[in-house]
Amino acid sequence: MGLLRASSDKLGQEVNLDATVGGEGASDIEHGEALVRFAEAVTRGNDDMDPAREAVRKTLGEAGFVEACGIVGIFNGLVRTADSSGIPLDEGTLHGSADFRERLGLNAFGGAANTEIERGDPAKAPARVLGVG
Amino acid sequence: MTSFDSTFAYDRDGFAVRDTIQQVHRTSWQQIANAGSYFTGEQRLEIARQARATRAKRGDPSWLREGLPDAEGRLSEVAVDAARTIAADAHKIDSEWAAKKIAALGDGAYVELISIVACMSAIDAYSEALGRAHEPLPDPQPGEPDGGRLAEATDAGAHVPMIDPFTGPNVARALSLVPSANQLFFANVMAMYSNGSGGFYDMEWGGPLDRPQAELIAARVSAVNECFY
């Protein structure tokens, strides 16, 4: 989510991170509502997958749709890598996400136990996310 | 020698998939079918089969997932349970669970197993997203595991040893204990997590999907999976 905020800032876009946990705000990003719906449908494997897929095709075109599929796919692998390896957050992300983790409910996820989340301090957040931005 | 050139025929199925993605998927299939560092090709394919079957039932509670395939002696019960859990319930994994699996399997085998399940999840989810059938699993290839591991891997506070310190994206070191496992999965990351004209270190991407759009998808996938990371 830090990269979502950083990349949006770079492009001068407002972003409401609530959209990532099922809240409002996806519309702040172009075609964001269709992308969130698609990401959720594929990840859950639910009955919305076919219409969600067609909605992304319609809004982003075939090339954008195929790229969106790549992001959905690889993050379904990355989450399993992170959770099963138990890798803690890096220092930059620990501090840089402290201001929204609790509000969005992320600290309640089981994987939070892998990181000393109480050390997170927004005042120590780096200007650049993960060394980029 | 099995040819993998006819696998992942995305173009035949009508999808304009970048060559880099098609190639890395073919290479992944070939690598999964061959012996790794801790498992034979037959065992690696059994991990893949268990992961695919269990992930297909990810919407069901674990106690209602009936009809999962029998490993028929190809894998230990511990390995089967690990593959199934990582495939469908990774968010429930805690240090105690991981420690038990690692004690039984060894840390290198556990890391290799993660890489296969993660690779399968990414490639299968990609096919599901596109709206095509899963690619059939290949036949196992002969060969013996080489026991490869990174001697410098150390305790970095995770369930498994990894390289530390590390200057790249943090998650890219998660499987660094076993170089072949790390390469298997992160080759897919390199190919799929970009749009061909921008990569991880670029906040602005050209092409049909911009970086905020990609990160919005990524964040929603993570949240639905209840992934803290």
Image (cartoon, rainbow, N blue to C red):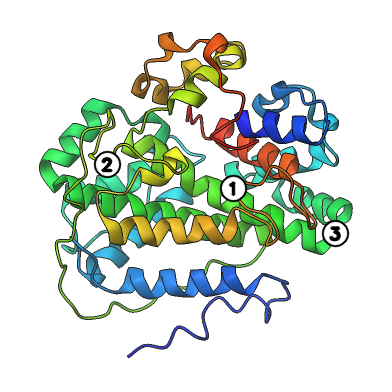
Mark 3 sits on what residue? A61
- In the rendered structure, which amino acid carries the disc numbered 1? Phe
- Quadrant location, the C terminus of chain A: top right
- In the rendered structure, which amino acid carries the disc numbered 2? Met
- Is residue B41 depicted above or below B68 in this figure? below
Q: Mark 3 belongs to which subunit? A: A
* In this view, the mark in front (1 or 3): 1
Residue displayed at 42% across by 10% down: A119
Q: Is residue B68 visible?
A: no
Whether marks 2 and 1 lie on the same chain: yes
Secondary structure type for disc 3: helix
**Pointer 2 local density, CA inside 10 Å: few below 14, some 14–19, many at least 20:** many
Residue displayed at 77% across by 26% down: A15
Relative to residue B216, is residue B91 drawn left or right? Answer: left
Q: Are marks 3 and 2 in contact (CB under 8 Å)?
A: no
Q: Is residue B56 visible?
A: yes
Q: Which mark is residue B200?
A: 1
Tell me residue A30's x, y (percent): 85, 40
* In this view, the mark in front (3 or 2): 2
Q: Nearer the viewer, residue B63 or B175?
A: B175
Secondary structure type for disc 2: loop
Relative to residue B214, is residue B179 drawn left or right? Answer: left
Tell me residue B105's x, y (percent): 14, 47
- In the rendered structure, which amino acid carries the disc numbered 3? Gly
Q: CA distance from mark 2 to mark 1?
A: 21 Å
Secondary structure type for disc 1: loop
Mark 2 sits on what residue? B162
Tell me residue B18's x, y (percent): 66, 70
Residue displayed at 37% across by 28% down: A88
Relative to residue B191, is residue A12 drawn left or right? Answer: right
Tell me residue B112's x, y (percent): 27, 54
Q: Are marks 1 and 3 in contact (CB under 8 Å)?
A: no
